[in-house]
Image: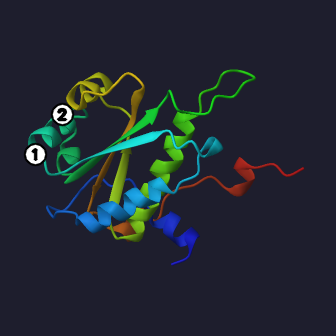
Amino acid sequence: MNFIELAKSRFSCRSYLDKPVENEKIMQVIEAARIAPSACNIQPWYFYVIKDDKDLLNKIHESYYRDWFNEAPVVIVCCADVNQAWVRKEDGKNHSDIDISIAIDHITLAATDLDLATCWVCNFYVDKVKEYLNLPEHLEPVALLSLGYPKEDKIKKMEKGRKSIDDIVEFW
C-alpha cells in the first residue's frame, strides 16, 4: 500500500483481540521509532515495552483507567529525555516533546503496516507511571501507546472526517 493509504488506514484503536503480539513485530515498530528523525539527530527518547510483566502491565493500565485500555496486550511508555534534547537558543524551547512525537508517529504507522493497531494516550497519571517504572527525573513520560490486534473494523475507521486542504493551508 502506498504511504497515503497507510496513513489513512491508521486509527485510534479502542478494542483489542485477546491475542499476544509477536516479539518480531514489536521489534519492528521499535525499529521504526529508532530511525525516526530528531533535531540534530540527538534522539532524545526512551521506550518501555510492557507486555510480559503482568503485574506491571496492570499497574500501567490503571494509570489510564478505561475498560478498553485494559484489553491492550502491550503498552509502550514513550519517554522524552529532556536533558538530551536540542534546545532552540532564541527562546529556550526544548524539542524533546517534538522529537518523541515523531518517533511515536513512526511506531503507529509501522504498527498499522503490520496489521496491528495503536492508540496514543496522553491523559494518564504521569506520576504513577514515573513511580511504577522508577523513572529518573530527566525522563518524561509523554504518552502511553496501546498496541495489539484490533477487534474494530479498520474499513469503518478509515472514513474519518478531516478538514479540507483549503482549511489548513495557505499558499503564497
Helix, strand or loop at mark 2: helix
Other residues around mark 2 within 10 Å, as few (<14) / some (14–19) / many (≥20) = some
Q: Give whichever of discs 1 and 2 has the lower sequence position.
A: 1
Horizontal and vertical percent position of residue 122: 39, 35
Label 1 is placed on what type of residue? Lys
Among the 4 quarters of the image, the one containing residue 73: bottom left
> For the point 42% across and 60% down, which residue is it?
31
Other residues around mark 1 within 10 Å, as few (<14) / some (14–19) / many (≥20) = few
Between tags 1 and 2, which lies in front? 1
> For the point 52% across and 35% down, which residue is it?
97
Horizontal and vertical percent position of residue 129: 26, 30
> For the point 45% across and 35% down, which residue is it?
80
Among the 4 quarters of the image, the one containing residue 22: bottom left
**Residue 151 left/right relative to 41:** left
Horizontal and vertical percent position of residue 57: 16, 42
For disc 2, the marked residue is 62
For disc 1, the marked residue is 54
Q: Residue furthest left?
A: 55
When the figure is inspected, residue 153 is found, relative to residue 144, above or below; the finding is: below
When the figure is inspected, residue 100 is found, relative to residue 163, above or below; the finding is: above
The one nearer the camera, 107 or 39, is 39
